[in-house]
Image (cartoon, grey):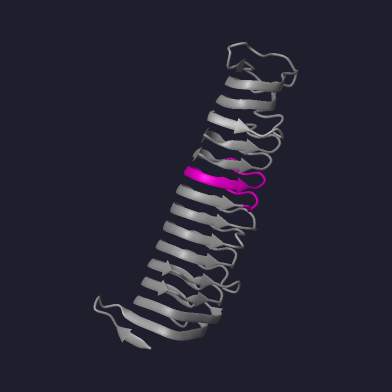
Amino acid sequence: MTIYLSNNMKLIKDTEFGGERPLFESHDLRLENVIIRAGESAIKECGNIEAFECRFEGNYPFWHVHGFKIDRCYFDVGGRSALWYCDHLKMTDTVIDAPKMFREMHDIQIENVTMNDADEVFWRCDGIRAKNLELHGGTYPFMFSNDMYIDGLESDSKYVFQYVKNVELRHAKITTKDAFWEVENVTIYDSELNGEYLGWHSKNLRLVNCHITGEQPLCYAHDLVLENCTFGPDCDRAFEYSTLQADIRGAITNIKNPMSGRIVADEFGSVTIDENIKAPADCEIRLRDERTCFSD
């Protein structure tokens, strides 16, 4: 069924399309309860598009789309590699089972979205604003993306947030490996970060009210800041070759060869300073009662 709305948009509802480019170069179009069957590039080179309660089964459904809304939709596994080279997207209450979503995009708003195969999603995107986002499975979400604000993230994907810049993250629970590698200007508030090798080679990484678990966290970091953070007992060899200012609540199992800065904690399991420490080798390590620690 096709009708025209009072705002000059064309409405297509309760139908399905398949094959190659069925809606190519469409503009000012609202889709309701539409199914995109097997095929490729259903909605390509389009603008001012709205999709409501639609299902996407064919490959590459949204490419080169400028200005669009996706609400209460579903992307089947076959709807892979959707949302490439697009801008000004608002997506709400949507479930995605397809991988490789969101590439080379800018100006993205997301709320209440679940991605069940978050493999290689959000690559080289700029301007992401997300609330209540879930990422499951896959590798390298958000790689090379910039200018992000995310409030409410649950992720068990591997290698999350690599090579990103200018990020504010709040209320996250991330279980992963090698997260936040080579990031720059990233602040994380009120979050739980679980995994090995957190934040290596980062610049201006700031953690506030966070709980950290996993081996060898926060090494080779430059200008690292921790405020009111806690560590799990498996966090050993922390801060190796890092420059930092750290306020740690409770105990930390082991600190090894920090380069410079200041570390304050309630308790240290051990502190390793050996012949391999790098200059300037002047990090001040103190218990909260002001006694300085130097022992291994």
Left or right placement of residue 57 versus residue 65 in this view: right
| Residue 233 appears anywhere in the view | yes
The residue lying at 60 percent from left, 74 percent from top is: 78
Image quadrant holding the C terminus, namely top right
Up-down: is 182 above or below 242?
below
Residue 167 inside the magenta-drawn segment: yes
Instruction: Give the x, y percent position of residue 237.
Output: 71, 29
Residue 50, position in %: x, y? 38, 72
What residue do we see at 60% from left, 71% from top? 77
- The percent coordinates of residue 136 (x first, y second) are 61, 58
Residue under the image location 72 percent in, 18 percent down: 273
The relative height of residue 165 versus residue 124 in the rendered view (above or below) is: above
Which image quadrant is residue 293 in? Answer: top right
Q: Is residue 98 above or below residue 143?
A: below
Q: Is residue 221 visible?
A: no
Foreground pick, 113 / 205: 113
Q: Is residue 56 magenta?
A: no
Residue 270 picture quarter: top right
User: Which residue is at the far top?
Assistant: 291
- Please identify the quadrant where the N terminus is shown: bottom left
Residue found farthest to the bottom: 1
Q: Is residue 107 above or below residue 167?
A: below
Find the magenta span and give its range: 156-182
Report the side of 24 relative to 80 (left or right): left
Task: Give me the residue at 63% from left, 12% from top.
Answer: 292
Residue 211 position within the rendered picture, expressed as x and y whole percent measured from the top left? 59, 36
Q: Nearer the viewer, residue 231 or 101?
A: 231
